[in-house]
Image: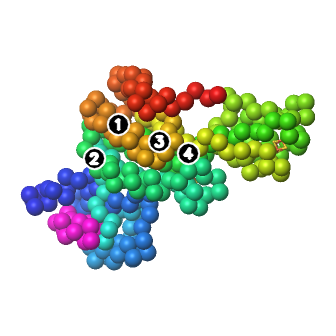
Amino acid sequence: MEPMHRSVHARGGVITQANPERVTVRTRLPAGILTLDQLRGLGEIAERFGADHVHLTTRQTVEIPHLDPDRIEELARDLEANGTPVGAERHEVVNIVACPGTDRCKYANVETIGLAQELDRRFFGRDLPVKVRITVAGCPNCCNNALLNEIGIIGRIRPIRTPGLCTGCGTCVQYCREQAVTIRNGVCRLDEDRCSLCGMCIHSCPFSLIRAEDRHYLVLVGGMSGRHPTPGRELIRVDSPETVVAVVDRVVYWVYRQARANRLLGEQLDELDFNRFRETIQKEFGDGGLQEP
Ligand code: SF4
Ligand code: SF4
Ligand code: SF4
């Protein structure tokens, strides 16, 4: 490799291929959002550099395959000018994913896209001993597998039923996918151990007897996809996107200082004394109330 290519090749967004004479370039697209001008620009850039197609990745980015490694510096400059710079894929914070959240989804409890873009501004490409994937989901449906990321953020809400007025009609029972609501003695009862705080039952009551309370973000750490999919462990629940960013800042710094290279973060949580880290975080940001009521 020529020295002039090292700076851009050192970025994880340049990926080697089975064919050693070609590389793929992955772009940085937080939350998978790009303007129509950027979309057109990407097509034009791909065509100019000899690609006849692009590839949409599982992390909401676009990658351009089969490129000449000798033209990567030039390509990187054009991608930067297009607002879709070279992305990340190695031991660093990689492209940040978000579901549509309150921008479009009727099930969403929280805004997701703006939060993912802010997390991108703060943490994208941060050099770390391990790869850190961050995903924001607007509700516990977790359409984007937020649970299986090194840092998963999930919007939740608590359904509070007005005592004394329930007719026992059973409509909210039908909406609950967790069998958390039953009708007993003509009124509905919530099994809090089963409730996932998804909020889906809230708008179902024909008499508007279910209120939404305690809207919050649950932050999980150490989820793994791939060969051994494992959900992350609950770290804390916080009330505002600003606090999510502050918590993620602590997690990223903890990973930077403590994690060991060449293993997934989720495989080393016990060695890193995750429970002690959780205690520290909960002390700093408040208990977080991970215990359900
Ligand atoms: S995770 Fe929830 S809010 Fe996000 S797209 Fe899926 S259902 Fe909608
Ligand atoms: S919030 Fe979700 S899980 Fe809880 S009772 Fe309502 S529908 Fe069921
Ligand atoms: S939908 Fe409303 S009235 Fe019907 S059982 Fe549920 S809380 Fe009671």
Q: CA distance from mark 1 to mark 3?
A: 14 Å
How dense is the environment of label 2, judged by Cα within 10 Å: few (below 14), some, or many (20 and up)?
Answer: some
Query: Crowding at label 4, few (<14), some or many (≥20) Cα neighbours within 10 Å?
Result: many
**Which element carries disc 1, helix, strand or loop?**
helix
Say if 65 sits above or below 162 in the image: below
Q: Main secondary structure of the magenta part?
A: helix
N-terminal label among 2 and 1: 2
Identify residue for label 3: 152
Instruction: Say whether disc 4 or disc 1 marks the residue closer to the N-terminus.
Output: 4
> Whole-Å distance between the Cαs marked 4 and 1?
20 Å
Badge 2 marks a residue whose secondary structure is loop
Counting from the top left corner in percent of width and height, residue 103 is at 56, 61
Identify which residue is drawn at 85% across, 40% down.
Answer: 166
Gap between marks 3 and 4, in whole Å? 10 Å
Asked whether mark 4 and ligand 1 are closer than 8 Å, the reply comes as yes
| Contact? badges 1 and 3 (CB < 8 Å) | no
State the mark number for residue 250. Answer: 1
The answer to which of marks 1 and 3 sits earlier in the sequence is: 3
At horizontal 50% and vertical 39% (from top left) the residue drawn is: 238
Q: Residue type at mark 2?
A: Arg
Say which element carries label 3: strand
Residue of label 4: 155
Residue ID at (23%, 53%): 11
Q: Which residue is mark 2?
A: 126
Which mark sits nearer the N-terminus, 3 or 2? 2
Q: Magenta segment range?
A: 65-81
Residue type indicated by callout 4: Gly
